[in-house]
Image (cartoon, grey):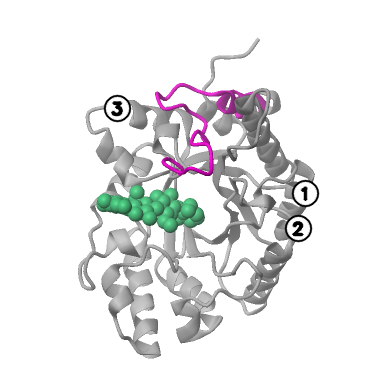
Amino acid sequence: MSSEKTLRELADENDVTIGAGVPARSFRQYPDDPTLAQTLKREFNAITTANALKMGPLRPERKVYDFDDADAIVNFGVENDMTVRGHTLLWHKQTPEWFLAWDYTDDQLEAFVRDHIHTVAGRYHDKVDVWDVVNEAVADDGSMRETMWYEAMGEAYLDKAFEWANDVAPNADLYYNDYEIASDNDKADAVYDLLQRLLDRGVPIDGVGIQMHSLPSYQHSREGPEAVGANIRRFKDLGLDVQVTEMDVAYGPDEEFDDRLEHQAQYYRDVLEACLDNGCDTLITWGVHDAGTWLQNRYDVTSDPLLFDENFNPKPAYDAIRDLLESRS
Ligand code: G3I
């Protein structure tokens, strides 16, 4: 018979980290409804800032930082003894409008990025346990993505970003994070090669985050546990830690199953099992409940990709990963 232990209790017993990425609007949207906070602290032992630490939300003006949303999420994590993941120090998306309009020189951009990383990672040096330092530096075809950072500094921007983060947050684990790298494919190969080069150059990188948005358009994030496990293993063999950082499981309108939620549950379980069997101890879902998913209002995918339904009731996916952890306790 199943015990009454929560997901968090079972995760703690197994030395496993189960987290959720939380947009600040979730906190703002339910100011008088403690359900989100209660579910988070009862069921998860990690929390990720889904949007609040990205440059756009964080920097309304060039010289103005607004840390309110990020502080709310980070402090919630610290107060509730959760592992806090900071997402993300450097990404080409969600940059501020004033930034896009700024006519900088390469040197100015480099100084700007250095100050940004020093300021943000420095502020949370004793609160954020894991940073997604650079997000999505590789394009879908496996070439280096031609971001503003890449154009100004070349590939060395990654080296610098990790070094700047390490300057001010030497105790945090520093991650490279990307999508479509869950199995053996051209992009995953390119990320593998990039990580190898960073390690060869002595860059202070600790791990790689596999986002795992399992959607119809992301074929390599829907592959079976053997492929996912083998890919985790090869990243581990580089000497890096591996985490599943942004998991959700959605389907296209034409994908029909006898019971879609059971299929979803099985995939969550399979991925967690592949993770645990191959030396990865962390799975973060990209949201807590279905009402908070970034996939709402999309015509092309189902909008119930998470572990809890819109009323915070646990779904079959919750039971599936809880049962897996219980079976390993
Ligand atoms: O907060 C503003 C709000 O003030 C405004 O009224 C509203 C109008 O559109 O926009 C709100 O901002 C939105 C923000 O999410 C918060 O909801 C942005 O428009 C929207 O673009 C933004 O989307 C985020 C997306 O990244 C940006 O590309 C999603 O929430 C976020 O879940 C998603 O997360 C990314 C990871 O960071 C990296 N990996 C992929 C993942 C999914 O795309």
Residue 316 pos. (x, y %): 59, 23
Q: Quadrant of residue 64?
A: bottom left
Q: Quick one: SS at disc 2?
A: loop
Name the residue nearer the viewer: 133 or 180.
180
Please say whether residue 91 is visible from this viewpoint.
Answer: yes
Q: Main secondary structure of the magenta part?
A: loop
- Gap in Å between the C-alphas at discs 2 and 3? 42 Å
Q: Is residue 298 shown in magenta?
A: yes
User: Which quadrant holds residue 2?
Assistant: top right
Q: Is the residue at mark 3 in contact range of ligand 1, meaning its CB lies under 8 Å from it?
A: no
For image coordinates 56% across by 44% down, the residue present is 247
Residue at mark 3 to residue at mark 1: CA–CA distance: 39 Å
Amino acid type, residue under disc 2 in the picture: Asp
Label 1 and label 2: CA atoms lie apart by 7 Å
Identify the mark at residue 184; answer none if there is no mark. 2
Give yes or no for contact between labels 1 and 2 (Cβ–Cβ under 8 Å).
yes
Per the image, the residue denoted by label 3 is 34
The answer to which image quadrant residue 261 occupies is top right
Q: Say if 228 sits above or below 193 in the image.
A: above
Magenta residues, start to end: 295-324
Mark 1 sits on what residue?
Answer: 227
Q: Nearer the viewer, mark 3 or mark 1?
A: 1
